[in-house]
Amino acid sequence: FRFKESLAEDVRRADLVISHAGAGSCLETLEKGKPLVVVINEKLMNNHQLELAKQLHRDGHVLYCNCSTLVETLQSMDLSTLKPFPPGQPEKFALFLDKVVGFQ
Amino acid sequence: TGGHTTEILRLLSCLSESYSPRHYIFADSDKMSEAKIRSFEQKRAETFSNSQFTLDRIPRSREVRQSWTSSVVTTLYSILYSLPLTYKLKPDLVLCNGPGTCVPVCISALLLGLLGIKRAIIVYVESICRVETLSLSGKILYYFSDYFIVQWPDLKEKYPKSVYLGRIV
């Protein structure tokens, strides 16, 4: 498929997700508790996608690789090493913003 | 665009109905954000009866990998477009999270403030993707926003005027 409205159902049914390092894709997958292998796209300027994948990998939440090392990663991976990903806290932002704007 | 829209909708998810009406501004080339926003607002309307929002498109400031010189031109063009829009909306608060689209809008809001027409609070939340370096929008708006929020401690260290609340999306 080209573009679907939402990949939520596909992610829910998957045992493993292989994705690019876009924040939405990573977060959606990790929040559903699915093991994630992140593939870095080296053609985007500055390659900032790598920063998030590296950090998530450092924190033990994902495996990461690039296109050429994908097969090798899939063959040698151990998914039991992945740590659960705690959700973000938008309520903290709401509290902060309320203070800033003056809604106490 | 895509990831930015998903993130900003999460930021909005816990805001009270005092943050109303909400005016969404996004790039004319963006095909998917409108659907995401409508879906978010639809759900919101189930809880809050008087939910109000608008959608506006402006020319995209810059494409990925666009050259510096042509980026200045296209950004200026976007500012020409966003200035009357911002003047019409006269926001109290501008919340943005990094797409190039936000720079002309913030500059417009700043201009309106400088001209004494309307002073908005500008809050910038850097994307969760940015762990070690700021986006180009972030590098610019770090100096022009009232509150600049980062989501990883490395950035708080590098940009001491920023606010660190942990992961908020």
Image: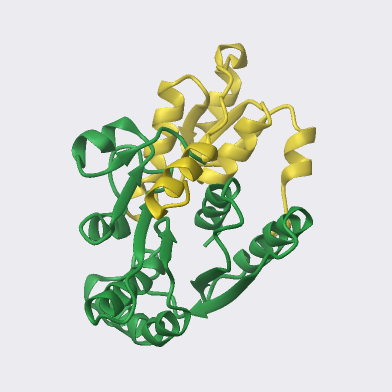
Chain colours: A yellow, B green
* Looking at the image, residue B70 lies above or below residue A98: below
Task: From the viewer's perspective, tell me whether residue B140 is left or right of residue B88.
Answer: left
At x 52% / y 41%, what residue is drawn? B169
Q: Nearer the viewer, residue A44 or A74?
A: A44
At x 42% / y 43%, what residue is drawn? A96
* Looking at the image, residue B27 lies above or below residue A104: below
Q: Is residue A19 visible?
A: no
Q: For residue B59, which quarter of the picture?
A: bottom left
Give the percent coordinates (x, y) of residue B27. Answer: 49, 73
Q: Is residue B150 visible?
A: yes
Give the percent coordinates (x, y) of residue B87. Answer: 40, 83
Q: Could you tell me how many numbered marks the image carries?
A: 0
Q: Nearer the viewer, residue A65 or B164?
A: B164
Task: From the viewer's perspective, tell me whether residue B49 is left or right of residue A78.
Answer: right
* Looking at the image, residue B27 lies above or below residue B140: below
Q: Nearer the viewer, residue B146 or A11?
A: B146
At x 59% / y 45%, what residue is drawn? B14
Give the percent coordinates (x, y) of residue B119. Answer: 32, 71
Q: For residue A85, which quarter of the picture?
A: top right
* Looking at the image, residue A73 lies above or below residue B102: above
Task: From the viewer's perspective, tell me whether residue B86 is left or right of residue B119.
Answer: right
Give the percent coordinates (x, y) of residue B64. Answer: 39, 64
Q: Quadrant of the N terminus of chain A?
A: bottom right
